[in-house]
Structures are given as C-alpha cells and as structure tokens.
Image (cartoon, rainbow, N blue to C red):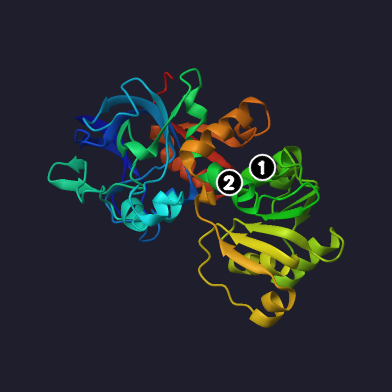
Amino acid sequence: MKIAAAVAHDFNQPLKVEEAELDQPKNDEVMVKLVATGMCHADIIATQFQMTPLPAVLGHEGAGIIEQVGTGVTNLKVGDHVILTVASCGECDQCLAGHPAECRRVNELNFGGYYQDGTKRLHQGDQELGNYFGQSSFATHAIVNKRSAIKVDPDLDLKWYGPLGCGLNTGASAILNVFQPDIGDSVAVFGTGAVGLAAIMAAKMRNVQQIIAVDIHDNRLELAKSLGATTVVNSRDLKSADEIAEAVKQVTNGYGVKYTLDTTAVSMVSLAAVKSLDIMGTAGLVGATQELKMNFTADMLADNRRLMAITQGDSIPQLFLPQLIEAHKKGQFPFEKLVKFYSLADINQAMAESLDGSVIKPIIMIDENA
C-alpha cells in the first residue's frame, strides 16, 4: 500500500517526507496506522552516523491503531490501540529469561535494516528502504512484530504515549527495575533530557530521600526540581570529572551518592558519575559513551564501586509500560511537561530543536485529526 514516510536518504541531510510502498504484514506481524511517534536521540544520531543502513525510514516510539494482523497473531486484533517498542526475537535465552533488550539478535533486528526473516517491507520503486528498530514509525503506517506492539486502553489519548516505548521507559526503568533504590538512598542523574527527567520522576515515585539533577541548563534544572529533584547542580563552568564529582559530593554528606545515572554519553560526565559515588555505590550508563578512561584502582576498586551499562532499563515492555501509564494517570509520572508536538512536515524542525536543547521531547503528529 502507498504511505507517506520521512525518508533518510543520506547522512547529515534533512529527512524528506515522500510517498513509499509498504508491504502487507506477514504471519507474526501487524500493520499499525500511526497516530503519533516520539523523536528519540537515537533517531537523530542515525542521520549523522552509520547506526543503520540508509536509505531508511527512522522512528521507533510509535503509537497507533492496528489495521491488519498476520494469520499467526492471536494476542492482537484489528482496532486495538498499541504502543510500539523495540524489536527482539522472543526465542533466545536472553528473551526467554525476561531480558528482551539484551536479545542476542538485538543489533540485527533494530539496526540491521531488515525484519526478522531477513526481508524489508518498505520500497520506493526498485529501491528498498531500511527498517529501524523493527518499526520505522516516522510514517503513516508501520509493520511490526506482534511482540513489539503493546496493547493499551482505547480510551487513552494515543498522541502522548509513543515516548513510553523507548526513551521514557529507559530512564524510568533504570531506576525502578535496575537500581530499585530505597527511601533513604540518594540518586544523582546526569543530564536532564527526556531520559534523565524520566529517571528523576521514577526516583520520586520510590520516595528516594535525595535526588540530585546535574545539567548545564538552568531552565532544565528548574524543570527537574518541579518533577522531583531535591537538589540541582549546574556543571556548566566545571572543567573536569573531578570538579563535577566534588560539586555533587558537596550537596550530599561529602561522601557521595549511592546511585548515579549518566544519560549524556559525554565521556567526562560518565567518569564524573563514577567519581560521584559513595563506597559500594553503583553507576549506570544509558548513553552511548564512546570512550571512558579511568584509574581502576582509585575510581573503582578502592571504594568497591560498581559500573554497569543499562539498555532499555532491562524492562519487559508488556509489563512495565502499563505500569508507567497507571503512574501517569495518577499524576506520578507527568511526562507531558516535557513534550512539544510537530506535524510530520515539520520533522526536521523537531530534530533541530531537539538538538539545540530548546525542546526536550518532540512528538511527531502523524494523524493531525487524532
């Protein structure tokens, strides 16, 4: 069928909203008519670096309504409202153990450009278009595997909920599923974009005693305070990881914090997240930090600190996303404060404003009448 899609043809070039052909869903797949899709930093960097082969249709925080189902799909039906999330095989040991974000085929299925059977579904004439995150939701319609479509209450206003499928899930789940802090604990979050602010909201949900937000933008730090941060640190003028860590320690008991989460992917900040820890503290990195150099003895071993990578918050989306929705309904996870809406035609403006920091979480409205 003919659809409209924002196509990435070349690196460092604007996306072009064009007509494309979308194949029918196969046995274990569904076709979703998109209502809206969030824009994640992973969409932006895929236009800059070789994360996935181009040309491709990006987008991986979709929300919409199922229009077709494959013959092997029994858990979903036409008319179901769904949030879309990352792709996994559902068959490997990691998937079966409840770690779909660590699926042994995760890179292939999300960044390889193909679906699980090795084929593509998007075309422009003889040119195949790559798939992204098993979804490609910067389009009017998308084909996804049944595991990537999370059924939600049809009374929900779908335009808000696509970002739960990746970025907000990552930040909140890093706190709630991985760290699981206690009431008396302390947490420092480095970077107050969508992922970091989701982590701050989640820490408040856990009644964490001290929640420290670290960023270089005063306006974002003010927002962090409104969402649950008890203390903020502006690191704009700090020149080293040691200076940032010292600033964090000064607003605690001088020893450091129990948990740190770096969402920035800036090497100096990632190191600061380690250096800010108390004895036996844990640092989690969710950003794609390119290089991290440290003195293992001084920075890790001497205080028995832990450093871990966290992918997608190690969540099971089918279980965790409904919990986030319930928290949002109760006012405990007010992510709507982060959002600005754009039309599909304005997708490049959304990308630019996300990059310059003026917008925290863009959402692309695919169906303007929704």
**C-alpha separation, residue under disc 2 versus residue under disc 1:** 8 Å
Image location of residue 58, percent across then percent down: 36, 45
Residue at image location 73% in from the left, 67% down from the top: 280
Q: Are marks 2 and 1 in contact (CB under 8 Å)?
A: yes
Residue pictured at 83% horizontal, 66% vertical: 255
Foreground pick, 362 / 297: 297
Under tag 2, what secondary structure?
A: helix
What is the crowding at mark 2: few (fewer than 14 residues within 10 Å), some, or many (at least 20)?
many
Amino acid type for the residue under numbered disc 2: Ser
Determine the image quadrant of residue 92.
Answer: bottom left
- Whether residue 348 sits left or right of residue 134 in the image: it is right
> Where 51 sits versus 14, above or below?
below
**Residue 56 horizontal/vertical position (percent):** 29, 48
* Outermost residue to the right: 253
- Residue 173, label in figure: 2
Quadrant placement of the N terminus? top left
Left or right side of 357 for 151: left
Taking the image as shown, residue 310 lies to the left or right of residue 176, namely left
Residue 168 seen in the current view: yes
Dividing the picture into quadrants, the one containing residue 6 is top left
In this rendering, the answer to whether 226 lies above or below 159 is: below
Side of 197 relative to 243 (left or right) = left
Q: Tell me where residue 270 appears, x and y as whole percent.
A: 62, 65
Describe the element under mark 1 as helix, strand or loop.
helix
Identified by mark 1, the residue type is Ala
Identity of the residue drawn at 53% across and 72% down = 291
Q: Which residue is mark 1?
A: 202
